[in-house]
């Protein structure tokens, strides 16, 4: 019983970490693209 609970908790924890990691990657990617667009528009303006 204890092993099963531990496995379930481990699975839930891993999925949570995976989702957080995915959200972080997506957020970082969007920030990077936003920065590129900003620097590009700034370069074209000057």
Image (cartoon, helix red, strand yellow):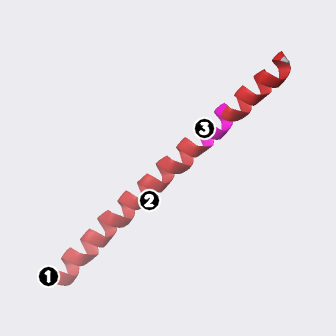
Q: Distance between the residues labelled 2 and 3?
A: 20 Å
In the image, is residue 28 above or below residue 40?
below
Which label's residue is closer to the chain start, 3 or 1? 1
Residue 22 x/y as whole percent: 50, 52
**Residue occupying image coordinates x 42% and y 53%:** 19
Q: Which of marks 2 and 1 is in front?
A: 2
Q: Nearer the viewer, mark 3 or mark 1?
A: 3
Q: Residues within 10 Å of mark 3 (few under 14, many from 20)?
A: few
Q: Does the magenta stretch include residue 5?
A: no
**Residue occupying image coordinates x 48% and y 55%:** 21
In the image, is residue 31 above or below residue 10?
above
Q: Residues within 10 Å of mark 1 (few under 14, many from 20)?
A: few
Q: Nearer the viewer, mark 2 or mark 3?
A: 3
Under tag 1, what secondary structure?
loop
Residue 31 is marked as: 3
Residue 18 is marked as: 2
**Residue occupying image coordinates x 75% and y 29%:** 39
The reply to whether discs 2 and 1 touch (Cβ–Cβ < 8 Å) is no
In the image, is residue 2 above or below residue 42?
below
Where does the N terminus fall, quadrant-wise?
A: bottom left
In the image, is residue 30 above or below residue 8?
above
Left or right, 30 with respect to 6, comes to: right
**Residue occupying image coordinates x 33% and y 68%:** 11
Q: How far apart are marks 3 and 1 (CA)?
A: 45 Å
Residue 44 x/y as whole percent: 84, 20
Residue 26 x/y as whole percent: 55, 44
Quadrant of the image occupied by residue 34? top right
Magenta stretch: dominant secondary structure: helix
Q: Which residue range is magenta in the image?
A: 29-34
Left or right, 36 with respect to 12, comes to: right
Quadrant of the image occupied by residue 42? top right
């Amino acid at each position: 019983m204890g092993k099963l609970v531990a496995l379930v908790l481990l699975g839930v924890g891993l999925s949570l970490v995976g989702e957080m990691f995915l959200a972080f990657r997506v957020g970082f990617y969007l920030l990077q693209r936003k920065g590129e667009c900003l620097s590009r528009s700034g370069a074209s303006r000057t």
